[in-house]
Amino acid sequence: MIENRREFIKKGCILCAGLSTSALVLSGCEATHYIAGTLSDTDLIVPVSEFNSEKKDKLQKRSFIIIQNEKLEFPIYVFRFSDTQYSAVWMKCAHQGAELQASGDHLYCPSHGSEYNNLGEVKQGPAETNLRTFPVSVKDDSILINLRKA
Ligand code: FES
């Protein structure tokens, strides 16, 4: 079952890579939204509105976004649990440091198959430790990811 899911995800990503024409690409069954965010002295700042998505004129909420900023060595996966609750997870595999891929509410490693949930907790090895995470707070219309307190 897991092997079938991995195969599906891999094929989906290969297909999606070919379809990518903008900052939006497909990952698994959900469109992935990439943004750069804004860096301050301590925080990476993301407008809450980045989780908004319009589908057939209906406003929907994305379950996650990925922050890719040239000043960061790895992307950060930000998962939305509610309007005020988010997780921020460093997308560097705890096994041997490969960049992870996101698919809905989990992350997986294309190198050796480790899997993590949306809190960065390891769910399948070979990785044995959880991912690095960052404290997240919401102020006004912004999500603040504290990069100093990992
Ligand atoms: S580097 Fe990710 S599982 Fe090995």
Image (cartoon, helix red, strand yellow):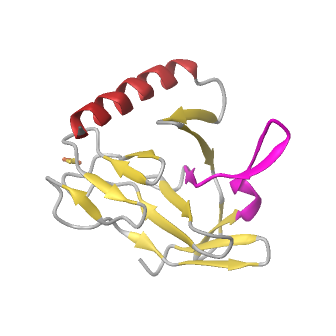
Drawn side of residue 120 relative to residue 55, left or right: left
Image-quadrant location for residue 124: bottom left
**Residue 19 vertical position relative to residue 51 in the rendered view, above or below:** above
How many numbered tags mark residues here? 0
* Residue 23 screen position, x and y as percent: 65, 36
The quadrant of the picture occupied by the C terminus is bottom left
Drawn side of residue 88 relative to residue 99, left or right: right
Residue at 65% in and 57% down: 37
**The magenta stretch spans residue 65:** yes
Residue at 46% in and 36% down: 28
Q: Specify start and end residues of the magenta stretch as a single range.
A: 47-68
Residue at 58% in and 77% down: 42
**Residue 21 vertical position relative to residue 63 in the rendered view, above or below:** above
Drawn side of residue 93 relative to residue 106, left or right: left
**Residue 29 vertical position relative to residue 103 in the rendered view, above or below:** above
Nearer to me, 62 or 1: 1
**The magenta stretch spans residue 90:** no
* Residue 6 screen position, x and y as percent: 29, 35
Nearer to me, 78 or 43: 78
Residue at 41% in and 67% down: 119
Farthest-out residue, front: 1
Nearer to me, 7 or 32: 7
The quadrant of the picture occupied by the N terminus is top left
Image-quadrant location for residue 7: top left
* Residue 122 screen position, x and y as percent: 26, 62
